[in-house]
Structures are given as C-alpha cells and as structure tokens.
Image: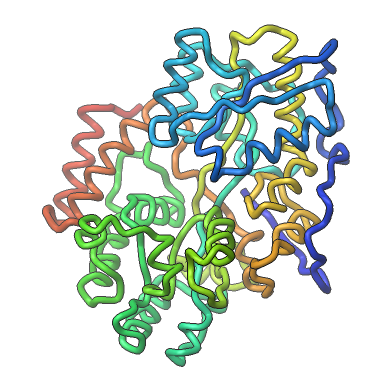
Amino acid sequence: MKRKFAAAASLVAVASLTLAACSGGTTEEPAASAGPVTISLSGWSLETTPEFQALADAFTAENPDITVELKGYDAAEYNTLVTADLAAGTGPDIITQKEVKFVTTFQEGGQLLDVSDIALPEGIGGASSYEVDGVAYGVPYRQDSWVLFYNKDLFAQAGIDEPDGSWTWDDYDAAAGELSAALAPARGGYMHRWQSVVQGFASAQNDTNVLDGDYEYMGEFYDRVLALQDDGAQIDFNTSSANQLTYQGEFGKQTAAMLPMGTWYTATLIAQQASGDADTFEWGIAPIPQLSSSTAGMDNEPVTFGDPTGFSINANTDAAKQEAAKKFLAFAASEAGADVLAAIGITPAFSNETVTETYFGVEGAPTDDLSKFAWSTHETHPENPTSSKTAAIQGILGDMHTAIMSGSTPVEQAITEAQDRVENEVGLD
C-alpha cells in the first residue's frame, strides 16, 4: 500500500462523522435490499474493540432498512469458532477476516461469496490480500502498518535527539544503547515477543516473503536484535516471556523509550493515558527504521509491513441478506467508513487528507508533522501472503523465532532447520 499525505496548514478538531456516500471511488453500489433486513457481523472483544459497533451504527444511519447485529467470539479462538459455526450452518452473514493467512481456508471450504462486483475507492490498501486466482472474496476496511512509537519526554530527559524520519536500524540500535545508559533502569527500546517484530521487517525490507522458502536474509535481523539484548538495550526474550510482559505496559509505564508496533496501538495508548492505565507523557510516531538509507527520510517512502483486516460474506447466506451485506462492505471500505474508523483512532484501509485530519484530530493524538508522515506515508508489504501454505509456514517460522530468541539454537542452525522443515512438511512450488 502506498499512501501520501500533504500536511495541512492546521488540523481541525474531530469532525462530525461523514455519513454521506464516498465520492469518486465507489460510484457503483450493490442494489438495495427489498424491505427491512437484519444481517449479522462477526467480531471479537466487542467491549474493547469499538470498530464493529461504530461501523454498524454509521451504516444503519445511512441505511435504516438494514440492521447490523454483532456476533461476538473469543479473540484467541476466533478463527476456530467461526469455522465451526460456518460448518454447522450458524455462521454470521458477514465474516470479519481477523488474519489474512486464514482467508484461503474459508475460500477453499466454499464458505466465501465472490464480491468482485463491489467497487473500491482508488488507492485503498490491502485489497489484493483477499483475492484468490483473480477473484475477490473480501474487502479491506483497515490497514495497519508498523511504525516506531517513541517517548518524547524520555528522549529529552536523556538529552538525545528524537527520531527525524531518516533512521536506519543502525541509528535505532545506537539510540537504544544511549537511552539505556542515560535512563537506567528504563531501557532504550522494547521489542515484543512476536515473530513479526523481526521477521516482518526482514521480509518487507528485503522485498521477499515467506513463500520463497529461503530465510537466510532474516539472519542479520536476528543478529542485531540479539545484540540489543546482550547489551541491555532491551529486555531479553526469556525475561519478557517468563513475566508475560505486555508492550502496552512497557511503553505506557515508561520502562522503554521506543516501541516498534503496529498503528493499532495509537488508539490503545490514547485510551490508556486518558484512563490512567498509562502514564502521562508526550509521545510521537516515526517511520520504522529502514534497512537502507535509500528508503529513509521524509523525501522517500519508508518500507514496512502490515496485514489488512477485512470483511467477507458467508456464501450460504440468503440472497436478500447477501445484497445487504455487500452494501455494508462497500460502506466499510469507502471514505465515509474510513472517517468513522479514523474518528476512534483506527487506521482505515482507505485514507486521504480528510481522513488523516480526522485521525489526528482525536484528543490525545500527536499533532507533529513527523507523526502524520509516519502514519500516512509508507510502502506496506503484507506479512502473510495469501496462500493455503502461509499458515503452516508461519507456524514453522514461529518455532524458529522462539528457538533463536530463547538462545536454545544458534541463528544459522535454526534458519537451516526451518528451511528444511518448510521443504519437507509444506513443500513449495
């Protein structure tokens, strides 16, 4: 996804939600359903994940003959539970695709409707992740990308220059060491335990993906992360695991000055600072450090990664509900839907200057130009390419990540073992 933002002279406060149909990209909409209809929409953690209700309410305000009812699932078992309901014939009419790597599982099971006839706005990100053999089986409504959150107050306390958008990973590593020395016992950075935090950047910034079967390029990323641990610039993987540390706690309670994380954290951090669950401090967003200076700086387009989140339609839903569901998908992907999401701090799949103003108009959000640039300007590669083999490969790479980060297996050996497992257990074309 490539998104550009031209900074406005000033940002307005959060505007009233724009519920009118998006102009430009979505000139054709599915035909209206005949009479009142109720459609169900799957989601998770409904009390703490406001995007589902926000989109449902805004859509119904524009389409009063269509009611959207939420069907909540346990977040940890979401895909398993939705799959079971679909098999039993009790699945939702609209299936939220929580993880791209499971799209082909639903598609191959004949559970997804072809939605290629839904027109999407030009420039929307993540649409290709829902295409299988040229057929669209879903549409994106949000597109998170990984950026660098940093604590301005801790940088000032340490007397170290803040990120300026030009950083490579060498710059990040140097700053992490200097911050740790100046702020002890706080550390310069926190990198969470997920394999994404190493492998996602390695794949995106080397312009490859996990389907290639060759993971030697990940070695240098693991070497530098292990060096940060050894130098005490970030807490080690085993301590983080044993204490079940959270990235929200490490950054929000100021025990780490920097945090590579997805843009979804913006809404969480704003909410936690407002509630007191996070400390009060000034923070900003910078582009994620780059492998090469050729993509660094505000005159370039930083390379990062992130998967979209999308909506699909249950292929076994009756025709009237399918048409209503298509209208909902078109709305969720439109500028109007994007503005709804931006107003609650969610990064939509579609963005323009108006949506960006709404996002940064949220009370508690940063307003500096670098934060706006980092959020709106990047080339985002998918972490999970759409393939029936992705989930199995990521499982193997997850084992590799744990082996390396825990210190149980040297980097080169772990990578070789993972490559052999992918070849023998999954197989690649």
Farthest residue in the left direction? 408
* Label tally: 0
Instruction: Tell me, yes or no, if residue 14 can be seen here.
Output: yes
Res 141 quadrant in image? top right
Instruction: Tell me, yes or no, if residue 136 can be seen here.
Output: no
Res 406 quadrant in image? bottom left
Farthest residue in the front direction? 275
Q: Residue at x 39, y 30 (%)?
A: 77
Q: Residue at x 83, y 27 (%)?
A: 63
The reply, left or right, for residue 1 in relation to residue 232 is right
**Eyeballing the image, is 417 above or below 158?**
above
The reply, left or right, for residue 253 in relation to residue 264 is left
Farthest residue in the bottom direction? 159
Q: Return the x and y of residue 325 as percentages of the image width and height.
A: 71, 21
Q: Return the x and y of residue 268 as percentages of the image width and height.
A: 54, 57
Q: Return the x and y of residue 269 as percentages of the image width and height.
A: 53, 62
Residue nearer the viewer, 388 or 308: 308
Q: Residue at x 63, y 51 (%)?
A: 347
Q: Return the x and y of residue 250 as percentages of the image width and height.
A: 38, 66
Q: Residue at x 45, y 72 (%)?
A: 168
Residue nearer the viewer, 84 or 390: 84
The reply, left or right, for residue 223 in relation to residue 353 is left
The reply, left or right, for residue 188 in relation to residue 99 is left
Residue nearer the viewer, 243 or 176: 243
